[in-house]
């Protein structure tokens, strides 16, 4: 139990040293990440659709 409490105290001490981002930076980063995720999802969907169409044409699927 002594090791656990010591560990938690060290964790708390380290977290007090962290420089946290401001609200504007967090919002800006969230918007940027969301935009990139949407772009990648669109790209993957288009590639999937294209490959699916090509394979159906080659294999004579429904």
Image (cartoon, rainbow, N blue to C red):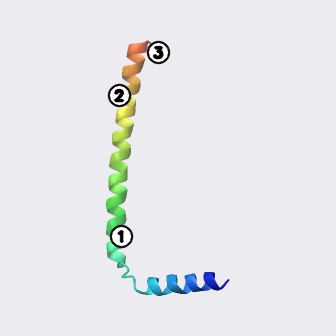
- Position of residue 13 measured from the top left corner of the image (x, y, whole percent): 47, 87
- Position of residue 47 measured from the top left corner of the image (x, y, whole percent): 35, 33
Q: Is mark 1 on a helix, strand or loop?
A: helix
> Disc 2 and disc 3: Cα gap in Å?
14 Å
Task: Return the residue nearer the eye: 58 or 35.
Answer: 58
Q: Which residue is drawn at 61% across and 82% down?
A: 3
Residue 42 position (above or below residue 8): above
Q: Residue 50 carries which label?
A: 2
Residue that mark 1 sits on: 27
Question: Quick one: label 3, few (<14), some, or many (20+) residues within 10 Å?
Answer: few
Furthest residue in direction right, as rendered: 1
Residue 34 position (above or below residue 9): above
Q: Which mark is residue 61?
A: 3
> Disc 2 and disc 1: Cα gap in Å?
35 Å
Task: Return the residue nearer the eye: 23 or 1.
Answer: 1
Q: Residue at x 36, y 72 (%)?
A: 26
């Amino acid at each position: 139990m002594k090791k656990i409490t010591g560990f938690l105290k060290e964790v708390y001490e380290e977290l007090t040293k962290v420089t946290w981002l401001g609200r504007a930076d967090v919002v800006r980063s969230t918007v940027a990440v969301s935009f990139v995720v949407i772009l990648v999802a669109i790209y993957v969907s288009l590639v999937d659709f294209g490959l699916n169409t090509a394979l159906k044409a080659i294999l004579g699927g429904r």
